[in-house]
Amino acid sequence: MLALVGGMEWRDGCSFDRTLLDAAGDAGDVEVLILPTAAAYEHPDRAVAWAERYFDGLGAKARGLMVLSRRDAEDESNAAAVRAARFVYLAGGSPMHLRSVLKDSRLWFALVSAWDEGAVLAASSAGAMVLCDPMVDPRGGAFTLGLGLVAQVAFIPHHDTWSPDKARRTITLAPATLPVVAVDEQTALLRKPDGEWAVEGAGQVVVFLDGHEAGLEALPR
């Protein structure tokens, strides 16, 4: 299962995290592997500590894998940890830094392999932006290259607090056939193993296609 989260992760409104834990296995036996890569310059240790406390409250364990640089992403022990994980969570932060660290790295290929083998993958804000291709450039709302785990979908996080001008620019610039997904904070767009899409959490998800609102059926399966 894949969860693209709109931001403000690991809070009470994130009801979808229980769904993700159930998908990964028995909560008491699941370890959530936290990648604070996007928060490398924003106290990544605090992000990990927050996640550990949050998942402890859900009866699960979390631990951080401190992949903060390109060198860390090429470390085989880090790649092996991701490859073996049943639940990986990419924290929010800088999408540009996250992309530069992960692109074509050993850890990226391990992450794709784990997801292909059935691991749960959640990514919040910057993480969700980077997993998609094209990727929304947060500096102005135009498009740039993403990592493409989810192809032909663009992602706007923090839609309830995002700049309306940037959101409008993104929606206007999008090709007619490209769905743009705008997700509120503490809300997740879930992709189930059968390709079906669903929404859980405190807020809303809006899909835009050719400048107009569309339903989840506009998303690729």
Image: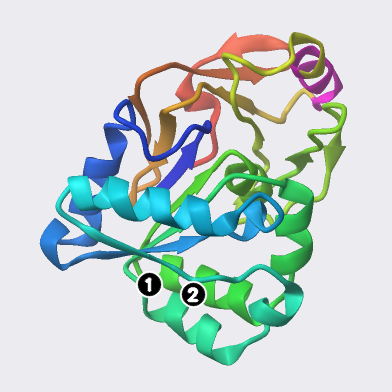
Secondary element at tag 1: loop
Count of labels shown? 2
Q: Which mark is residue 117?
A: 1
Q: What range of the chain is rendered magenta?
A: 167-175
Residue at left 37%, top 80%?
A: 84
| Most foreground residue, 178 or 7 | 7
Task: Report if residue 79 is visible in the image.
Answer: yes
* Residue 54: quarter of image: top left
Q: Is residue 94 above or below residue 142?
A: below
- Residue 83 location in percent, x, y? 44, 79
- Residue 131 location in percent, x, y? 62, 51
Residue at left 79%, top 23%?
A: 170
Q: Is residue 194 magenta?
A: no
Residues under labels 1 and 2: Cα distance?
Answer: 6 Å
Q: Amino acid at mark 1?
A: Glu
- Residue 110 location in percent, x, y? 53, 77
Q: Is residue 169 magenta?
A: yes
Q: Tell me the crowding category of disc 2: few under 14, some 14 to 19, or many 20 or more residues within 10 angstroms, Cα based.
A: some
Q: Amino acid at mark 2?
A: Ser
| Most foreground residue, 154 or 123 | 123
Task: Report if residue 90 is visible in the image.
Answer: no
The overriding secondary structure of the stretch rendered in magenta is helix
Q: Tell me the crowding category of disc 1: few under 14, some 14 to 19, or many 20 or more residues within 10 angstroms, Cα based.
A: few
| Most foreground residue, 138 or 50 | 50
Residue at the extreme bottom of the image, as rendered: 76
Residue 210 placement, left or right of 93: right
The residue singled out by tag 2 in the image is 113
Residue at left 79%, top 63%?
A: 100
Residue 183 placement, left or right of 17: right
Contact between marks 1 and 2 (CB within 8 A): the answer is: yes
